[in-house]
Image (cartoon, rainbow, N blue to C red):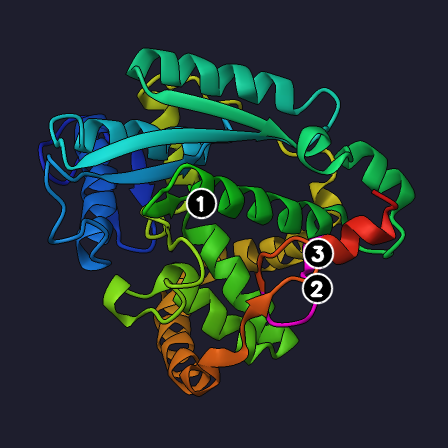
Amino acid sequence: MSMDCDRCGEDAVMHAAYSGAHLCETHFRRSVEKRLRRRIREDGLVPRDATPEDPVTWLIGLSGGKDSVVLTQLLAETFAEDPRIELVALSIHEGIEGYRDESLDAAEALTDDLDLRHETVSYAEAFGVRMDDVVEDDPENMAACAYCGVFRRDLLSRYADEYDADLLLTGHNLDDEAETALMNFFEGDVDQMAKHFDASLGPMPERSLTDKHVPRAKPLRDVPEKEVALYARLADLPAHITECPHASESFRGEIQELLYSMEDAHPGTRHSIMAGYEQLARYAAKRADADDGAYDACDTCGAPTTGGRCRKCQLLSALGA
């Protein structure tokens, strides 16, 4: 049975079980846009001293999937008339046969339509490896996502520095962040909670690592994954919505299934997890501030690291690259 929008009486296109809201297309899209803009405001992402004469550069990690496509579209719309913000999109080709090429086509189509600068870099060019080959070799006996996450983060950080970006933005949604929170809980990794807060969760004035890394932001982290996907479909965006062929091997996939079942049984679980997790991560980050001098330069590549050699260089060495 169809339901009416709570706000205007038109046919609803979605029902948010966690809030009880029924929304038509117009009010649903406004809801997503409002949450993104509120997150930008509450996290203090636009510097008070930014001016048209001295604008800031935001680098968007654009994979061509639904999350990054929606993020790029909304940022472009939000700041289209704001000369204080310059947007640059960066796409990364991991070297996964039959997967990344189509999403890069989507990224190209979107940035052409928005008239945004778009750069592309590959693992093959940067590291001399392809993810399909990494999965085949797997010298560290890890899930594919563990390698890929390290390499992707390194490239995003490296090119954020190269383009002199003031902020690095990614399309992580509410499900992504709740999964990360649960993974850190289950692994008992308090240090990672602190890094998570400093890297991308905390309001800009509360972060302590911004002098070592280009700060990150996740403006869609209040929006559930299915709502991001629905927004992409309703807005007719060129998103490539296909699961990575290696994703099912990861620990994150198990956490995702657990989160789905909990959310179905107890709507609002994701929001509750993040509300508590952000408070704990804030406390962990404050505790870690006493060790502020622990970061050093990687012996091999010079990237900031807490050990003599960064994880990316360790993995490349194991792969013989």
Local crowd size for mark 1, using a 10 Å CA cut-off: few (<14), some (14–19), many (≥20): some
* Residue 304, above or below 92: below
Locate residue 44, reporting x and y percent. 20, 57
**Residue range highlighted in magenta:** 305-312
**As drawn, is 58 to the left or to the right of 281?**
left
Q: Identify which residue, 12 or 228, lies in the foreground.
A: 228
Residue 272 visible at all: yes
- Is residue 264 found inside the magenta-colored segment of the image? no
- Is residue 306 found inside the magenta-colored segment of the image? yes
Circle 3: element type: loop
Locate residue 238, reporting x and y percent. 43, 17
| Residue at the spot of label 1 | 161
Q: Amino acid at mark 2?
A: Arg
The mark that comes first in sequence, 2 or 3, is 3
Quadrant for the C terminus in the image: top right
Q: Residues under labels 2 and 1: Cα distance?
A: 19 Å
Looking at the rendered image, the disc whose residue lies closer to the viewer, 2 or 3, is 3
Q: Residue at x 53, y 25 (%)?
A: 120
The mark that comes first in sequence, 2 or 1, is 1
Quadrant for the N terminus in the image: top left
